[in-house]
Amino acid sequence: MHQQLEKKLAKLKGTEAAIVFPTGYMANVGTISALVDEKDTVIIDRLNHASIIDACKLSKAKLQVYPHKDMKALEKILQKSGKYQKRLIVTDHVFSMDGDIAPVAEIAKLAEKYDAMLMTDDAHYTGIYEGVGAGIGVGKEKVEVRMGTLSKALGSLGGFVCGSKDLIDYLRNKARSFIYTTALPPANCAAAIAAIDLILETRPKLLKNLEIGHWKTPIIPIILGSAEKTLEASQKLFDQGIFVSAIRPPTVPKGQARLRITITAQHTKEDLKCLASSLQELIPPAEKQ
Ligand SMILES: Cc1ncc(COP(=O)(O)O)c(C=O)c1O
């Protein structure tokens, strides 16, 4: 089951090979700490997921952070990174709390120019955009390490990394969170295998649902500021039969609590209209950002 899933993921991502971890968190921790150490530097976007930050700390590599999607700042860091043996840039592909997309093509160009490896965390990208192209995320640019999780669009549990055969063989023998823990239960692999087929079948419907305004990803944040206000709004929506999670500190900075709307392929036009009118009633226009 694990091998079948790995083959399927590699095919989905268009890479030579893949390796499956027990969770996405463990995929980040095992991969980053296997790729860099104290002689190296790891350079990350300020809004990257917590599992990437923890992984960087564990790796002992020099951690350098650039402001969100700031390519000038990233280049400045890279210009001064000659003293490190290796450079690894890591970015969320679709940012988990804001739903915006990393400028992967630009980052890949900088990575090439300054001889850095590039790793994307595709947790919120997987199953939505592979092969869709058209200016969204990865095209043909070089991304050596494509990490993802089975726990978002695929609705299962587990994490994975896709890349070259050499990279995957290396991780199989070096990533401690792969070697020293129990593997994913086969049932979760089977569920993910089935989910990939289902996703490819239903994706056109999801993409149609995403044609709302300028937004291009299934994550739509509505920042309300205070945690109390956000919890109250989430509860009111729940009472109307709409499940929208309230995201609060420490997941987001203080004062930036938000409703995080997730659009799926199963939502109908009526569902989306109903959500829009409930939000309109709930949140006065001045509070929407
Ligand atoms: C961007 C990102 N990376 C990694 C993870 C960790 O994945 P998992 O929940 O499978 O451990 C998550 C979600 O929790 C995430 O949003």
Image (cartoon, rainbow, N blue to C red):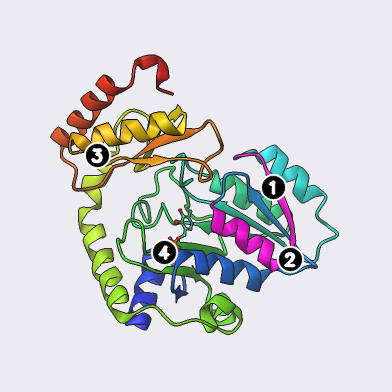
Q: Amino acid at mark 4?
A: Lys
**Residue 156 pos. (x, y %):** 31, 65
**Is 214 situated above or below 4?**
above
What residue is pinned by disc 2? 60
Mark closest to the chain's N terminus, 1 or 4: 4
Q: Amino acid at mark 1?
A: Val
In terms of secondary structure, where does tag 2 sit? loop
- In this rendering, would 169 be left or right of 13? right
State which mark lies toward you, 2 or 1.
2
What residue is pinned by disc 3? 209
**Residue 207 pos. (x, y %):** 28, 44
Mark closest to the chain's N terminus, 3 or 4: 4
Q: Are marks 1 and 4 in contact (CB under 8 Å)?
A: no
Distance from label 3 to label 1 (Cα)? 34 Å
Q: Residues within 10 Å of mark 2 (few under 14, many from 20)?
A: some
What residue is pinned by disc 4? 13
- Which mark is drawn over residue 65? 1
Q: Which residues are magenta?
A: 49-69
The quadrant of the picture occupied by the N terminus is: bottom left
